[in-house]
Image: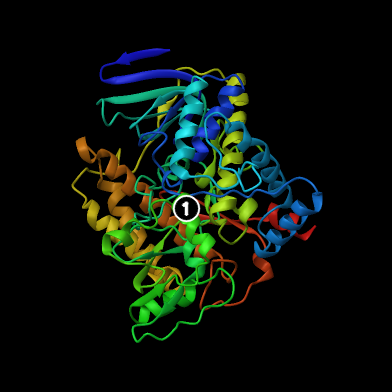
Amino acid sequence: MNRSSGETLELTADVLIIGGGLAGTWAASAARRAGASVILADKGYCGTSGVTATAGPGHWWIPPDPPKLRETAIRNRRKTGAGLNEPGWMARILALTWESLPTLEGFYDFSKDENGAKQYRALRGPEYMRALRKLVDSLGVTILDHSPALELLQRFDGSVSGARGIRRQKGGAWQVNAGAVVIATGGTSFLSRLLGSHTNTGDGYLMAAEAGAELSGMEFTTYYTVAPVRSTMTRSMSYAFATYYDEDGAVIPMPPGPETTRPLARAMLKGRVFCDLARTPEDIRAQVPTISPNFMLPFRRWGIDPYKDRFEVTLHGEGTIRGIGGLRIVGEDCVTSVPGLYAAGDAATRELVAGAISGGGNINSAWAVSSGQWAGRGAARHAAENRAGVGGRPIGQAGLRPASVQRAVDLGATLSAIQSEMLPYDKNIFRSGEKLRHSAEVLEGAWAEFDAHAEGVGGGLLRTRETAAMLATARWCAASALARDESRGMHQREDRPETDPRFNRRIIVGGLDRVWTRSDYGHALELAS
């Protein structure tokens, strides 16, 4: 049903999906196939926005036969996940990803190997997202492009009943009344210049928290990606073959395996760092233009051959994008702790599968495919039992409805404060209790000012709300890192270098006026059993 109220486009659907990236489109397709009417609202243009559209995503792709292949993969991931992931969730993801990707036949032109077998594991991001756009269009999903959501609607019983947002190109506002909502807005890198992440500002975290949702794993936000300086080209596959040099040309020793962030960050705190990709095998070089067609663009502009020439590099923080944290999942259908509200992809915690280390590209992609479908189906079931209709009230706070008297708040200065606590290597990679407490104090001060006085209007409405979301997210990250008084996985404390068995549990965080943390003792009991 469509209805106009002044400048507000008012719509009704069984399920509203907020976010049109990898998880959001899979969620929309699953909800529609389950018989629900579906509206998808995307901040950008569904099919081109989000981090997948600029990537060459692989998937956690393991055949079901012989069974020991998956059993071994799960066992190995369980070990590296530092005790915070669960075999059952990993098995479900491997199964559903294996089943799902071939269903894109007819929408995506899968490449073939030398034997003619179709290759489903690694896809080309731009074409992948175009295929998913075609899929949801074919299923009859209503798409609101360039229509960022600003706040959720909530009934008096606490259940979520839709959302409100703005129409950036057509003007005016929109409101969708829905029986259930899926948050698939991605994570946030705090605008670190990570490729494809400019629209990923943590909006879904804030909207869900305003409804009472909890988050988990927010301390695991120390993943950084190598990129050439003055570039957003954070495609990391080729750097597996990099050799790094300091300013004097001496080789910087790297540990075996993928963990290069800490030694690189230490070197960068001392001076400039350079690298070349001379060790890249010829067959990999030949595949790069297909897998990551944009990887070579900055080098061509600069007249650099990265396989021969040295070039300066930096590290871009990935925040919760290739970090682990997100909205806490309390059921197998990816429902949050708020009735009628579901989460998928980077908007949800990935501790269930990745544990305390990054899921990288393959596990995160498989999680988006799977969690999207579970959330979409779960939302469709909930909507079937809870008829959509008018009745919810808008609940947005920071940046929309100041707690005190409205007055101008410097958004640039607020963003700078966020980035100054969340991105520097010496604060975020090399953590300590003292540094984290200082960060928490700075962020609390910024929040007090912002929440009390900031009110987005006109062209500044969206950026004000995005800044509120990043600031709230930063507070939760700092609080969670303080609460985990140990080192585990990617969360490394210089003052607590050992892993402490007392923290064999997840850290749950929430709150807006006052941030709180608590331990997930249910998970701790599961680990002990």
Looking at the image, residue 464 sits to the left or right of residue 41; the answer is left
Q: Quadrant of the C terminus?
A: bottom right
Please tell me whether residue 296 is drawn above or below residue 155 in the rendered image: below
In the rendered image, residue 327, in percent from the top left (x then y), is placed at 53, 46
Tell me what residue is drawn at x 59 percent, y 48 percent. 59
Q: Within the image, what quadrant is residue 210 found in?
A: top left
- Tell me the residue that label 1 is attached to: 321
Q: Within the image, what quadrant is residue 250 found in?
A: bottom left
Please tell me whether residue 467 is drawn above or below residue 371 in the rendered image: below
Q: Amino acid at mark 1?
A: Ile
Please tell me whether residue 108 is drawn above or below residue 505 in the rendered image: above
Task: Name the one closer to the observer, 289 or 116.
Answer: 116
Q: Residue furthest left?
A: 408
Q: Within the image, what quadrant is residue 175 found in?
A: top left
Looking at the image, residue 231 sits to the left or right of residue 108; the answer is left
Helix, strand or loop at mark 1 = loop
Q: Quadrant of the N terminus?
A: top left
Looking at the image, residue 525 sits to the left or right of residue 307; the answer is right
Total numbered badges shown on the rendered structure:
1
Task: Name the one closer to the observer, 452 or 11.
Answer: 11
10 Å neighbourhood of mark 1: few (<14), some, or many (≥20)? many
In the rendered image, residue 35, in percent from the top left (x then y), is placed at 60, 19
Observer able to see residue 328: no
In the rendered image, residue 287, in percent from the top left (x then y), is placed at 50, 55
Tell me what residue is drawn at x 64 percent, y 52 percent. 353
Observer able to see residue 74: yes
Task: Name the one closer to the observer, 71 or 282.
Answer: 282
